[in-house]
């Protein structure tokens, strides 16, 4: 991995781009900006997903008029994500006619190829830059392969045709992209916009072209750079193409802010582009956003869907909970989560209990070691205790079944509390049995095994009671919902494990012949 390219830092709202700051994840809405409600909802969703800058389209008067309202609504709900205005042919007019829009936006995005033609081009570009100076806003100058400055491209093509060693037309187009961005940035500085308010980008849809353009752009300037493969496409194609191009450039230290320009499926999740951008940066070691979830990949030895379902639930739970976790637990994004952990724990516990069971059965059946003294195993009274614990498994399962979408925890709390009472009753009766037996752990080997097995199980019951208390607290706070209940599922799995172990223990210890 090459050292990060040194660029001039640019302040966009409350976020720093370049200047050694971490690579910033950016996204864009696909709503009609004039629709304030829809745009606010999508911006807020993108911000919750982790987008640190959100771009919106400002293409007409209605959209420009809506921008201050969008900004105000977002601030009211506690969302202060910087908003970028994406201007097209009439950006200069919209900024002049709507000063509230010019003030509310945190950055202006200009494509030199679509700000105007011939004489109007320089004039309209200058007007946008002047507004950026007036309102102290940064600007992203984004040259675009699909709307390249035709005057510049024609000039370079003519020069190339006259050259004794002409290069291919595609290479000329790449050079036009680089020059368009750099010349526009130089023009902005001449007008008075300082370098620490300029970000460059070159949007290309072909992977190899994108790499070549950005290598040249980075070589020839120290402006902050926004990286993205434009029109990447839908689904896996868009993700793979963007990752391939941007991964190579990131590895060479070229990038200050990043966006995946993915086309969502009809009715699909717009926040996918944010999640993919975060995952690329995290897997390459540039940023940490959420705890990494390690899970079994699946093979011929794992035909069960348990791992897939558990990994999916945990991943969803983490993403949902991260906004709250980041405020309460600084550094939580650096954690690693192993889905196999719970399964491995349960398997190891079963192995431990199994070793005790086998040794006990060997003593009583194979070797015929009798109970010490005249003590008779209280199988009948312990049967009642066993039924109590088995019943608690049902009440614990009912807690899961009572989950709803809104986190109303009354029913969940009630079932968990009933489970707790049954478990505490079981433990109390077990302690009472210890006080009434006629032998001690020192009374031959069977006595030691009896106390080890039942005592170890009692410890597991006690831990389960503590987990139930935690579950009840979270139920009162409304933390368990039908979409976010991985923790409650873990408590339930543990409690079922405790109950199953006891049923086996009761069968082996209490129901074997006493002599």
Image (cartoon, rainbow, N blue to C red):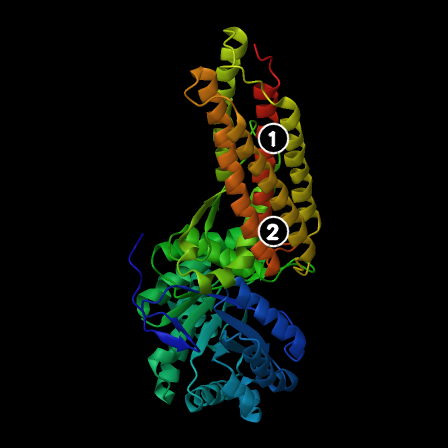
Q: Which label was assigned to residue 129?
A: none
Q: Is residue 289 visible?
A: yes
Image point (63%, 32%), residue name: 385
- Image spot of residue 124 (x, y percent): 50, 87
Q: Nearer the viewer, residue 52 or 257?
A: 52
- Image spot of residue 11 (x, y percent): 39, 77
Q: Is residue 161 visible?
A: no
Above or below, 268 against 461 in this view is: below
Above or below, 4 against 451 in this view is: below
Q: Secondary structure at mark 2?
A: loop
User: Within 10 angstroms of label 1, few (less than 14), some, or many (20 or more) residues?
Assistant: some
User: Within 10 angstroms of label 2, few (less than 14), some, or many (20 or more) residues?
Assistant: some
Above or below, 38 against 279 in this view is: below
Image point (43%, 74%), residue name: 180
Instruction: Using the numbered discs, state the Cα–Cα distance from disc 1 to disc 2 in whole angstroms.
Output: 23 Å
Looking at the image, residue 52 sits to the left or right of residue 494; the answer is left
Which tag, 1 or 2, sits closer to the chain's start? 2
| Tag 1 residue | 500
| Tag 2 residue | 485
Q: Quadrant of the C terminus?
A: top right
- Image spot of residue 333 (x, y percent): 43, 56
Above or below, 100 against 493 in this view is: below
Looking at the rendered image, the disc whose residue lies closer to the viewer, 1 or 2, is 1
Image point (64%, 56%), residue name: 481
């Amino acid at each position: 991995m090459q050292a990060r390219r040194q660029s001039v830092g640019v302040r966009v709202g409350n976020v720093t781009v370049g200047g050694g700051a971490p690579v910033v994840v950016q996204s864009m809405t696909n709503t009609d900006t004039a629709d304030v409600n829809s745009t606010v909802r999508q911006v807020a969703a993108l911000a919750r997903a982790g987008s640190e800058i959100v771009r919106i389209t400002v293409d007409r008067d209605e959209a420009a008029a809506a921008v201050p309202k969008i900004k105000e609504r977002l601030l009211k709900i506690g969302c202060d994500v910087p908003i970028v205005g994406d201007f097209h042919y009439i950006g200069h007019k919209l900024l002049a006619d709507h000063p509230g829009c010019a003030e509310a936006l945190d950055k202006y995005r200009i494509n030199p190829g679509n700000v105007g033609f011939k004489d109007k081009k320089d004039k309209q570009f200058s007007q946008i830059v002047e507004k950026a100076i007036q309102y102290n806003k940064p600007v992203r100058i984004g040259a675009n392969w699909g709307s390249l400055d035709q005057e510049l491209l024609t000039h370079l093509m003519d020069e190339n045709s006259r050259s004794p060693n002409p290069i291919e037309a595609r290479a000329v187009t790449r050079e036009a992209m680089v020059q368009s961005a750099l010349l526009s940035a130089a023009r902005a500085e001449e007008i008075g916009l300082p370098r620490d308010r300029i970000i460059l980008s070159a949007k290309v849809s072909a992977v190899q072209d994108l790499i070549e353009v950005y290598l040249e752009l980075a070589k020839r300037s120290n402006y902050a750079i926004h990286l993205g493969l434009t029109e990447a496409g839908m689904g896996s194609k868009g993700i793979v193409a963007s990752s391939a191009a941007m991964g190579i450039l990131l590895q060479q230290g070229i990038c200050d802010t990043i966006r995946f320009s993915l086309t969502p499926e009809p009715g699909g999740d717009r926040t996918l582009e944010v999640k993919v951008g975060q995952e690329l940066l995290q897997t390459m070691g540039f940023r940490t956003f959420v705890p990494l979830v390690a899970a079994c990949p699946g093979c011929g030895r794992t035909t069960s869907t348990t791992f897939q379902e558990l990994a999916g639930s945990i991943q969803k739970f983490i993403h949902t909970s991260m906004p709250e976790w980041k405020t309460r637990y600084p550094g939580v994004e650096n954690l690693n989560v192993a889905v196999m952990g719970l399964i491995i724990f349960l398997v190891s516990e079963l192995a431990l209990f199994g070793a005790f069971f086998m040794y006990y059965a060997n003593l009583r059946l194979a070797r015929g070691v009798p109970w010490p003294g005249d003590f008779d195993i209280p199988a009948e009274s312990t049967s009642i205790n066993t039924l109590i614990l088995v019943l608690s498994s049902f009440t614990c399962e009912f807690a899961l079944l009572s989950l709803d979408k809104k986190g109303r925890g009354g029913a969940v709390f009630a079932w968990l509390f009933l489970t707790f009472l049954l478990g505490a009753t079981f433990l109390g009766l077990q302690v009472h049995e210890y006080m009434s037996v006629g032998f001690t752990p020192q009374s031959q080997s069977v006595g030691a095994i009896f106390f080890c097995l039942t005592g170890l199980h009692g410890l597991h019951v006690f831990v389960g009671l503590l987990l139930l208390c935690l579950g009840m607290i979270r139920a009162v706070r409304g933390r368990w919902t039908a979409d976010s209940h991985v923790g409650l599922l873990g408590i339930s799995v543990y409690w079922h494990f405790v109950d199953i172990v006891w049923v086996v223990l009761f069968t082996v210890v209490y129901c074997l012949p006493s002599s």
